[in-house]
Image (cartoon, helix red, strand yellow):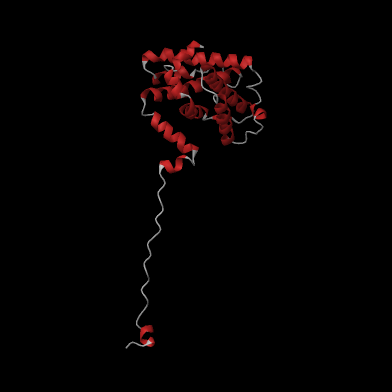
Amino acid sequence: MATEETKTISGPTRPTLQRPNIQKRLSWQDMANASPRVRVTRRIMKLQQDKIASQILEQGKRMCTDFVEAKLKRDGFLPANQQNNSTALKSFFVSSNRDTFVMVSKRMQEVGEMLEQCFPRVYMNIAQHVNTSFTNENIVNEVFNNVATEIVHDGVNWARIAAVYTFAGALTSECYRNNKIGFVCDIANWMYEFSAMHLVDWVKKKGGWVSIADI
């Protein structure tokens, strides 16, 4: 019969294996509610599978660049004779669409300029209106998204879309005026993402950007 002593010297006790705790891998669905960035990314990925929606987004982005350039020229931050973005990027569009895009882009600029003239205080001193300081790009991006979302809160129409573009131009101009040029380098990308979340379905139903000529 084994004694306590023989048990003690019989050798080291073999460690007991324990089953590891398996953590669930996060899926897109798990992260969707937690991250606005993920929601935007998922939305864009879905829209890029739709040829018409994808074109509307890309055209809207390039139109935003045109709009901002025109605004900066009017405010004296860019030389008036600088080549227009529509001309520089017209190779993006097939031949039959180039003139149409230029027309639509100019029409958006005309409507935006009219909005500025009718409501000058709305598009000036933006930082003061929203009671914040433009200390970094994230703050400016948040201001753009918050104000643009508020503009279309009660529904989308061409006037409100033009108001969003006008605000983007005014925001860029104010950053230039305060030597914060780098804070709005991605303004066209912000418009692209905002359009994906709020505008593209409505614009598509209207037959594309060309319908802005109706206003």
Residue at 39 percent across and 31 percent down: it is 46
Left or right position of 18 against 36:
left
Near-viewer residue (148 or 123): 148
Near-viewer residue (80 or 200): 200
Q: Residue furthest left?
A: 1
Residue 39 visible in image: yes
Residue 150 location, x and y as percent?
57, 27
Residue 156 location, x and y as percent?
51, 21
Instruction: Locate residue 204: give its quadrant.
Output: top left
Residue at 59 percent across and 31 percent down: it is 143
Q: From this view, report whether residue 10 is shown above or below residue 78.
A: below
Q: From this view, report whether residue 109 is shown above or below residue 154.
A: above
Residue 74 location, x and y as percent?
59, 17
Residue 80 visible in image: no
Left or right position of 12 against 139:
left
Residue at 51 percent across and 13 percent down: it is 107
| Image quadrant in which the N terminus is located | bottom left
Near-viewer residue (3 or 141): 3
Instruction: Locate residue 13: give its quadrant.
Output: bottom left
Left or right position of 57 against 81:
left
Near-viewer residue (147 or 132): 147
Q: Residue furthest top?
A: 214
Residue 33 location, x and y as percent?
48, 40
